[in-house]
Image (tube, grey):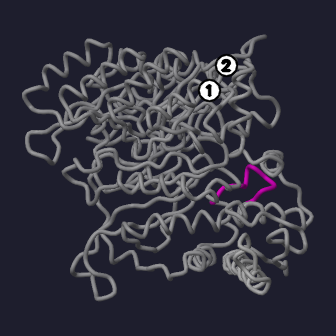
């Protein structure tokens, strides 16, 4: 044995065999998980190329769930959708250098690269704007003042000079030029923010109760869980292999709904009292697992009968997502959501697959043993309210259909620093909350909010006004929803002093980003022929709701040109105020009224 070679030939052979055996063992250790995803007699084997399915090599790393699912479609004679094939040809998570190079060349993406860029939060929104929109990931809607201030600066130097709040308690920058992707992608990272997975076929921003930790009525804090879910997604690459977008929400049972029943996975805080507890189910707070919400397809998340502790939620969500990755439809984009797997399999089969993936049985409890909270206040996201902490308040600041200018964002950040604890909380109602304010400072804060052109108090129309981006910035939208929403709100406020809130949701297309089916009044955009012209119009649904008022709105009017919408809605509200029972909410009035009577009411003048 030479001095330069410390091992004998026999030792080398032993070490080589040991290393190979270790590699094989590590790969084989994955096979029980992989085998869960294989059906129809398909065979998984291990060869020099890694893992193969019926002799065809597929990825053995964290992308294996999605790759095997794609391979199964082809082997069974199916055809991947255009978007699914694009992901098979080029992994969008590996496009960073390409995106930066394209930015340096001053070019926008073309073809399927437009779709793949969305995985990095970069949306090319032509032809409505020859620009990018960037969507962020802000788990639980929790933002620090210095981050908001930095985003305000970035919006002026690299985007349109304004920031939009979304219906997932998230933020968007718009009007980013072709050479601006590098600037904003690096700029948000300097602010400890990311956009990875905020678009495309990914788990979108994880939402929670925006008053987490300060709500006097909540059962449990949920923003910490949304953050844990966020980091779980970021650190498990397979969580980016979905066949379609996916939503997760945590509701703590407090005053402001997280709309968990509209999500693919909803975690709803409930209580088990001493009366219904036993050794296997101690009294306390749990989360009720609900699955399959997608209101754009007219379905809410349904109770599974499963109760989870807070510590179990994230891992179980991961198992649910993996089952969906393996079995979701990759041929038809319209059927590629979790709802359709549940419709096809039924809950029992799906939950059994989740148990196999998680490696533990789920806690299945009869609903009669749990108590659901009923604390929601539909106006708790606007105006000043007391926190659970002594001498502390929060204020819900009203943003015109979710938009604030850069200078307004800086002023909000300054208020959070000067009067609060540097926190800014975003809500699913497209506005924001400043918490931890002292009683002695409230008048000064009111003056500062009004001084920057925003409001802390809203009418019962404007407080529940929700609008997606619309045709001003989204290629799918059929109307300028934000502008139309403001026009309608002004028209109604000039005529009525409403004593109960009415939620009005404007959405621009079938994607239903503004969730028109759950509004008291929901409007989905369409094009309407008016003489020789084609103008913005809406189909109008009535009587939607969430939570205790859960229900899908009924389509009562079709293809109404927008100039006819304000008088039509005013006539409906006028008829409601004249004929309602004492203190009757609008949704109850609509649900007891026939379609014919509502149409007849709309033909009168307000």
- Can you give x and y, in whole percent of width and height, for residue 590 in the image? 45, 42
Is residue 561 among the parts visible in the rendering? no
Based on the picture, tell me whether residue 334 belongs to the magenta stretch.
yes
324 vs 481, left or right, is right
Which residue is at a point 36% across and 17% down the rendered structure image? 408
Q: Is residue 209 above or below residue 186?
A: below
Q: Which residue is mark 2?
A: 179
222 vs 96, left or right, is left
- Can you give x and y, in whole percent of width and height, for residue 77 in the image? 92, 64
Which residue is at a point 26% across and 25% down the rendered structure image? 457
Which residue is at a point 56% across and 38% down the rendered structure image? 513
Q: Specify few, some or many for label 2: CA neighbours under 10 Å numbering under 14, 14-19, or 20 or more.
A: many
Q: Secondary structure at mark 1?
A: helix
Q: Secondary structure at mark 2?
A: loop
Q: Nearer the viewer, residue 127 or 359?
A: 359
Q: Quadrant of residue 71?
A: bottom right
Which residues lie in the magenta part?
A: 329-338
- Can you give x and y, in whole percent of width and height, for residue 340 in the image? 68, 61
* Residue contact between numbered discs 1 and 2, judged by CB atoms under 8 Å: yes
- Can you give x and y, in whole percent of width and height, for residue 25 in the image? 70, 81
Label 1 to label 2: alpha-carbon separation: 7 Å
274 vs 87, left or right, is left
Which residue is at a point 81% across and 52% down the rendered structure image? 88
Q: Is residue 21 above or below residue 389?
A: below
């Amino acid at each position: 044995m030479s001095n330069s070679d410390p091992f004998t030939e026999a030792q080398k052979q032993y070490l080589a065999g040991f290393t190979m055996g270790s590699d094989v063992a590590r790969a084989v250790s994955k096979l029980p998980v992989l085998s869960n995803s294989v059906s129809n007699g398909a065979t998984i084997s291990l060869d020099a190329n890694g893992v193969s399915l019926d002799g065809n090599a597929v990825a053995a790393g964290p992308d294996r769930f999605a790759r095997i699912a794609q391979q199964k479609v082809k082997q069974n004679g199916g055809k991947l959708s255009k978007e699914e094939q694009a992901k098979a040809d080029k992994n969008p998570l590996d496009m960073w250098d390409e995106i930066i190079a394209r930015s340096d060349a001053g070019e926008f993406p073309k073809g399927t690269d437009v779709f793949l860029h969305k995985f990095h939060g970069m949306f090319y929104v032509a032809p409505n704007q020859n620009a990018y929109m960037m969507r962020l990931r802000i788990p639980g809607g929790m933002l620090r003042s210095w981050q908001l201030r930095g985003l305000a600066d970035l919006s002026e130097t690299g985007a349109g000079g304004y920031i939009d709040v979304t219906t997932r308690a998230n933020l968007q920058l718009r009007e980013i030029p072709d050479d601006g992707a590098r600037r904003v992608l690096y700029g948000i990272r300097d602010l400890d923010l990311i956009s990875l997975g905020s678009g495309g076929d990914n788990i979108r921003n994880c939402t929670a109760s925006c008053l987490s930790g300060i709500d006097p009525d909540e059962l449990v804090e949920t923003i910490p869980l949304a953050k844990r879910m966020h980091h779980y997604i970021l650190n498990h690459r397979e969580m980016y292999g979905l066949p379609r977008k996916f939503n997760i929400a945590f509701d703590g049972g407090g005053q402001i709904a997280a709309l968990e029943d509209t999500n693919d996975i909803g975690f709803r805080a409930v209580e088990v009292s001493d009366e219904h507890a036993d050794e296997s189910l101690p009294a306390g707070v749990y989360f009720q697992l609900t699955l399959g919400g997608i209101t754009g397809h007219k379905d809410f998340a349904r109770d599974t009968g499963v109760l989870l502790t807070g510590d179990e939620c994230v891992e179980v969500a991961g198992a649910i997502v993996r089952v969906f990755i393996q079995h979701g439809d990759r041929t038809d984009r319209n059927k590629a959501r979790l709802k359709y797997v549940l419709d096809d399999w039924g809950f029992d089969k799906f939950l059994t697959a989740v148990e196999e993936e998680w490696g533990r049985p789920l806690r299945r409890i009869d609903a009669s043993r749990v108590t659901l909270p009923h604390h929601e206040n539909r106006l708790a996201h606007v105006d000043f309210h007391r926190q659970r902490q002594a001498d502390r308040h929060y204020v819900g600041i009203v943003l015109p259909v979710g938009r604030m200018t850069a200078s307004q964002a800086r002023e909000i950040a300054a208020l959070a620093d000067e009067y609060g604890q540097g926190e800014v909380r975003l809500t699913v109602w497209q506005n924001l909350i400043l918490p931890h304010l002292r009683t002695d400072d409230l008048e000064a804060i009111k003056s500062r909010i009004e001084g920057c052109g925003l409001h802390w108090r809203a009418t019962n129309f404007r407080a529940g006004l929700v609008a997606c981006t619309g045709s001003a910035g989204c290629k799918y939208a059929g109307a300028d929803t934000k502008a139309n929403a403001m026009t309608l709100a002004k028209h109604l406020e000039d005529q009525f002093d409403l004593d109960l809130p009415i939620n009005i949701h404007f959405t621009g297309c079938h994607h239903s980003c503004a969730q028109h089916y759950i509004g008291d009044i929901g409007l989905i955009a369409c094009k309407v022929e008016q003489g020789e012209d084609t103008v913005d119009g809406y189909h109008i649904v009535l009587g939607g709701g969430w939570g205790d008022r859960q229900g899908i709105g009924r389509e009562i009017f079709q293809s109404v040109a927008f100039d006819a919408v304000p008088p039509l809605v005013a006539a409906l509200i006028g008829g409601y105020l004249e004929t309602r029972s004492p203190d009757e909410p609008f949704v109850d009035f609509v649900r007891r009224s026939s379609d014919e009577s509502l149409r007849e009411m709309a033909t009168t003048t307000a």
